[in-house]
């Protein structure tokens, strides 16, 4: 099936559509987002998965382009937004399924931390205001969308919490540059997955920083606390943009990660309309995140990257997330307040690990052979085996 005649996945047509919606026509002086956009849209078109699938891609692209237009116009009217500083962010960069979510959650409870929240990342325009941050109408709008996803695929909560007020991953910010892994998880097209796995998305961290500047301009302030395993694709670029970043890399047996992640992504694929065949998922998971792991290991050869990273084992995070957060603070010389400790204790009491259910998967059903996977990453396994 093909999309209706009025639906276009042509990049030029989508730029015109976004301009018509916003009444603006300046997309900025950096058009490097167009490469990822072209790959994404062509891969969706070539997938041939029907009108609803193509409509979702169309709507995502128009939303992103409209947001870029508004950001450019906003900077013209308020050039001071570009002077906003992002200093010493704490950034979790470990692979998915290595304890990053719970560690992110407890680190974000620091009273001086500033995580981006799902609602403001999904609907960033207009800029959030500190005075209405807790009551913004977009919270309910985004939560309604989350509720629809969970109604369709309730098993998502077996492995991952979702909510408009929860900390968002940088994956969602990367979408505004038409990059990052989120569309691998939902749309699941081979060509786009290959592009993300093998191509450094030039200009993405410029977009990322502009997004954080936008959120903190009139919104809450604090030490940015961030998370995305996709940062492993370009740790050098991350530090070029945020040279004083504190990077936290969590480690787990890569074979377990690949099988667990393939299983984790299946319900998101069903929601997004992508290919949820188990063996196909296993292959694309290994391609994408295997490349991320290899790129991250190569980046550690850069003394600047090596000095910025603190390594933590998954088992330690899983056993005591609060203690792991204490170790992060201690390593980077960040004060740990009693208020933060109290918040972590309350959070972990309310959200006990495993309270969302348990994930069940087998290596063979996703075509993941543990020995083959481990043999693919000799440098990683030799260096970090003691951490998993």
Image (spheres, rainbow, N blue to C red):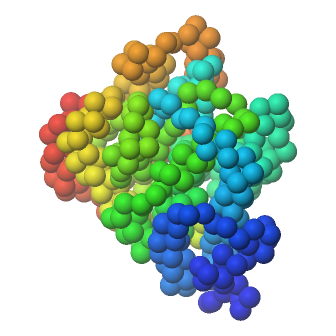
Tell me where residue 380 appears, x and y as whole percent: 20, 43
Residue ID at (53%, 26%): 107
Residue ID at (35%, 52%): 233
Q: Is 281 in front, or is 325? A: 325
The reply to whether residue 229 is visible in this rendering is yes
Tell me where residue 374 appears, x and y as whole percent: 20, 49
Q: Is residue 125 above or below residue 132?
A: below
Q: Is 122 in front, or is 304? A: 304
Q: Is 387 in front, or is 356? A: 387
The reply to whether residue 186 is visible in this rendering is no
Q: Is residue 21 above or below residue 75?
A: below
Name the outermost residue toward the top. 338
**As drawn, is 331 to the left or to the right of 5?**
left
Tell me where residue 30 appears, x and y as whole percent: 52, 63
**As drawn, is 58 to the left or to the right of 354?**
right
Quadrant placement of the N terminus:
bottom right
Residue ID at (67%, 67%): 26
């Amino acid at each position: 099936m093909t999309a209706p005649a009025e639906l276009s996945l042509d990049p030029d047509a989508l730029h015109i559509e976004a301009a018509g919606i916003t009444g603006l026509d300046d997309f900025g002086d950096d058009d490097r987002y167009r490469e990822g956009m072209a790959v994404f849209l062509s891969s969706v078109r070539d997938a041939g998965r029907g009108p609803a699938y193509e409509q979702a891609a169309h709507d995502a692209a128009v939303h992103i382009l409209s947001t870029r237009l508004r950001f450019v116009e906003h900077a013209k009217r308020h050039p001071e937004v570009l002077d906003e500083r992002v200093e010493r962010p704490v950034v979790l960069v470990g692979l998915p399924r290595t304890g990053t979510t719970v560690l992110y959650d407890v680190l974000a409870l620091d009273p001086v931390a500033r995580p981006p929240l799902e609602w403001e990342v999904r609907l960033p325009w207009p800029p959030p205001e500190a005075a209405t941050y807790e009551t913004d109408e977009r919270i309910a709008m985004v939560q309604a969308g989350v509720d629809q996803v969970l109604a369709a695929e309730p098993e998502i909560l077996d492995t991952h919490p979702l909510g408009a007020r929860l900390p968002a991953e940088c994956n969602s910010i990367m979408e505004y540059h038409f990059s990052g892994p989120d569309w691998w998880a939902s749309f699941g097209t081979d060509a786009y997955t290959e592009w993300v796995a093998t191509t450094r998305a030039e200009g993405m961290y410029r977009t990322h920083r502009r997004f954080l500047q936008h959120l903190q301009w009139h919104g809450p302030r604090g030490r940015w606390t961030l998370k995305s395993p996709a940062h492993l694709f370009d740790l050098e670029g991350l530090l070029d943009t945020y040279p004083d970043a504190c990077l936290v890399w969590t480690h787990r047996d890569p074979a377990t990660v690949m099988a667990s992640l393939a299983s984790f992504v299946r319900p998101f694929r069903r929601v997004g309309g992508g290919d949820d065949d188990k063996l196909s998922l296993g292959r694309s998971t290994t391609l994408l995140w295997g490349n991320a792991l290899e790129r991250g290991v190569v980046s550690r050869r850069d003394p600047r990257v090596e000095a910025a990273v603190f390594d933590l084992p998954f088992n330690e995070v899983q056993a005591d997330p609060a203690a792991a957060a204490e170790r992060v603070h201690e390593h980077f010389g960040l004060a740990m307040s009693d208020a933060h400790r109290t918040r972590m204790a309350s959070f972990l009491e309310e959200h006990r690990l495993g309270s969302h259910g348990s994930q069940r998967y087998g290596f063979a059903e996703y075509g993941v052979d543990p020995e083959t996977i481990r043999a693919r990453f000799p440098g990683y396994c030799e260096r970090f085996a003691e951490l998993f």
